[in-house]
Amino acid sequence: MFKFSKHLINVKKSFRAFKYYNYRLYFSGQTISLIGTWMQRIAMSWLIYRLTNSPFLLGFLSFLNSLPLLIVMPFAGVVVDKLNRYQIVLWAQILAALQAFILWFLVINTSVKIWQIIVLGLFLGVVNAFDMPARQAFVPELILKKDDLISAIALNSAIVNIARLIGPTLAGILISAFGEATCFLVNALSYLAVIIALLAMKLPPKLEKPTKTNWITDFAQGFKYTFNFMPIRAIILLLAIVSIMGMSYTVLMPIFAKEILQGGPKTLGLLMGAVGIGALIGVGFVAQRKNAWGLERIIPLAAIIFSISLIIFAFSRILVLSLVLMVFSGLGMMIQMSCSNTLVQTIVDDKIRGRVMSFYMLAFLGTTPIGSLLTGSLARYLGASNTVMLSGVISLISALIFIKALPEIKKLIQPIFVKMELITPNQDSFIVHNSGQ
């Protein structure tokens, strides 16, 4: 009875961010919208591979479509800190819906060309470069209590992985039955959910006046704040390496599904869905915690789980085993990402949050162009299996290096948590971790 009651308490802790009306709207709208987004991602990768039949072009086109994230996102953080974050998020959804609708129209009415896919991908990349840091910085505005932020951030990660679980599976079914165009149309319509949710929010007016500092000075300030503070720098660098070398394995998933596991769109959907299942388990683990203290120890351990799963997956030729390994890769990936996000969001100053989160999102998703190009190029010469194995090894080495820096990281962030009254002086992370469960 005691264990059952304790379990109920933990579930309540996981969902405590839902007590906020605005966050409930945000969660529901984003969930529907991101299901459509993942359907489009899977359909896009399948369309490109069907048109080109080239692993190199699969990676190269992903590189071009994601290039705006690498170039624009660091500067987008300045805009996010200067302008209204709510308005940025709202207009980003409208423009993304327009992109998906145009893509559907081209595929359904003409023989779509590669250059059209590139142009539309570049457009969406620019939109996402502003949308991603704006959404990251906007979520804390929906939460009144700092202790509830960890629940909101974890549930925010759950949104992505609910979509990752449902979207690819639906995409595989729809591509087989109706073709890729249907997925693009569903994605365009799904943006209505998040647009309606944003318009229904009740937000307090912003009282502070925008700063009149120079844009270059603001950017330099954000860069200095992010990379001069060792804990944030270490978290972002590990995330960047794992993103470049590890998470880019998704570019090669069509090859694993078709060539290695002898399947089709449904197999691709199952593989990506398995990643989503593992990620949701990881979200549940993070969301139950009391606060962000102690997450610095979990970050490298999660990266190790992710890396080892990839290494073994590279040599698997059995679908069931591959699906199990994808569950563990999703678990490790999501725990690392959620813990990193929560820790950074907790210790960062809100006035500079947009700029710091732009560098965070640059590390997490903005490095995708580099990873996609590198992964596609390596797969061309080494093969998909050897490329994924190498990616896992490099990610594993990076996690072990992070572990060596843990004492210094803990020493630097402890005063911040004490000042915020989230822990008492000299309190050990292990103790807080257990008291939060």
Image (cartoon, helix red, strand yellow):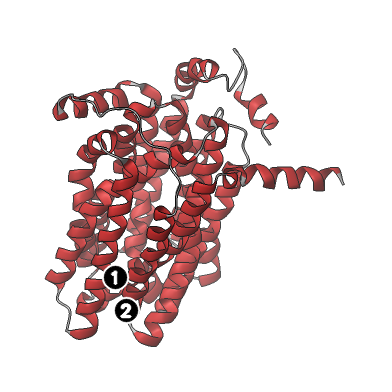
Say which quarter of the image contains residue 43.
bottom left
Foreground residue among 100 and 266: 100
Q: Give the label on residue 180, or none.
A: 2
Foreground residue among 319 and 268: 268
Q: Position of residue 208 (x, y in %)?
A: 32, 27
Q: What residue lies at 35% left-to-right and 32% top-to-bottom? A: 353
Q: What residue lies at 42% left-to-right and 63% top-to-bottom? A: 193
The type of residue carrying mark 1 is Met
Q: Secondary structure at mark 1?
A: helix
The 10 Å Cα crowd at callout 1, few under 14, some 14 to 19, many 20 or more, is many
* 161 left or right of 210 in image: right
Q: Secondary structure at mark 2?
A: helix
Identify the residue under disc 1.
Answer: 44
The 10 Å Cα crowd at callout 2, few under 14, some 14 to 19, many 20 or more, is many
Q: What residue lies at 12% left-to-right and 69% top-to-bottom? A: 115
The type of residue carrying mark 2 is Glu
Number of numbered discs on residues: 2
* Marks 1,2: beta carbons within 8 A: yes
Q: What residue lies at 22% left-to-right and 78% top-to-bottom? A: 105
Foreground residue among 95 and 374: 95
